[in-house]
Image (tube, rainbow, N blue to C red):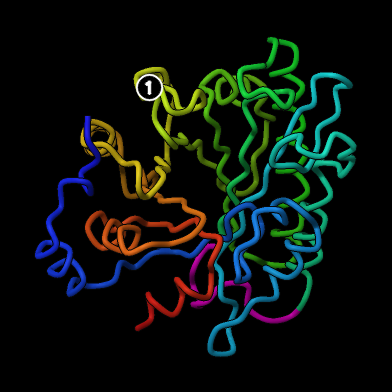
Amino acid sequence: MRSRLAALSLPVLMLLAACDRPDARVICHNANCAEPADPAQDDTLAALRLSLALEHDGRPAIDGIELDSFFRGSDGMCLYSHDLANEQESTLAIEPALELAAHFARPGPITFRDGTTFHVPLELKSHVSAATGDRHTPEQRTLHAQCAWDIYDIISAAAIANGRDVEISFTAFAPELLQALLDQKPPATPIPFRLGVLQGVPAPLDDQTRPLDDYRGLPIGIFEFHAQWLLDAQYEAFTAYRDAHATASDPVDLAFFMFTATVETFAAVEQYQPAMIVTSEARLFRRWLEH
């Protein structure tokens, strides 16, 4: 099935360019969103600090920041890492949460607009080695879920201690990981959390994206798609789920993620009006949204 965008003619794209900008939160992709985009800095503490310091018109440029946790199967370590390109990776997954805790404690706003909830998507990486097909054992899923809740505890405690309006989403390419999170859910969750489905490059081009039917039965609050790989069937499944399950207190949101924006990216954002834009180019999108 073709992407909707692939079928758009130039006149339609020109018409989309005249549409209203969405009222979307700008979320920092892989905690690395200072231009020029450099994927080699994804999920590093240095990039996270730089990204948290980004400003636009004297305000924070971002409304949230994505963190990644990677459970390394060879030694059972829960790491702050996008993948295992660096086999010597040793940064623990709780370390960026501690950086966020310190950020919340500093004076001043943490989002571009007052009254906006700061959103922390935590992606649980769905493989346990350099090979994307090397998936968790049941025991590893449990341990990874416990690690994710440890991160939640640090962020939620800091948010409450500093009076910050914060929510967390747990996202994954694997429904089994999201189920493990629910199975390990602690008795108290003092700040809001949601589950998110990730949909990237579709099969057979990539082996990580799973059919949305695989997530059936899970209480999904966010559907996050790659902005240039959204298929008709995926969007229709999202809208059907949202119409059936969303309430004022439990919304079901559309989010787009991307690395480097293109004309097609901006056209998709204007057409589909996502609630969140997870981007590696935070100030570019902030300028575009505020134009």
The reply, left or right, for residue 213 in relation to residue 41 is left
Q: In this view, does 181 lie above or below 34?
A: above
Expressed as whole percent of the image width and height from the top left, the position of residue 61 reads 56, 75
- The amino acid pointed to by label 1 is Pro
Q: In this view, does 280 lie above or below 170?
A: below
Q: Position of residue 218 (x, y in %)?
A: 44, 24
Spot the residue most to the left: 11
Per the image, label 1 sits on a secondary structure element best described as loop
Instruction: Identify residue for label 1.
Output: 211
- In reply to whether residue 202 is colored magenta, the answer given is no
Percent position (x, y) of residue 7? Answer: 15, 46
Query: What is the magenta segment's predominant secondary structure?
Result: loop
Of the 4 image quadrants, the one containing the N terminus is top left
Would you identify the image quadrant in which residue 129 lies? top right
Q: Is residue 232 left or right of residue 23?
A: left
In this rendered view, identify the residue nearer to me: 259 or 187. 259
Span of residues in magenta: 107-117
**Magenta-colored stretch includes residue 108:** yes
Residue placed most toward the observer, 72 or 88:
88
Q: Which of 149 and 173 is in front in this view?
A: 173
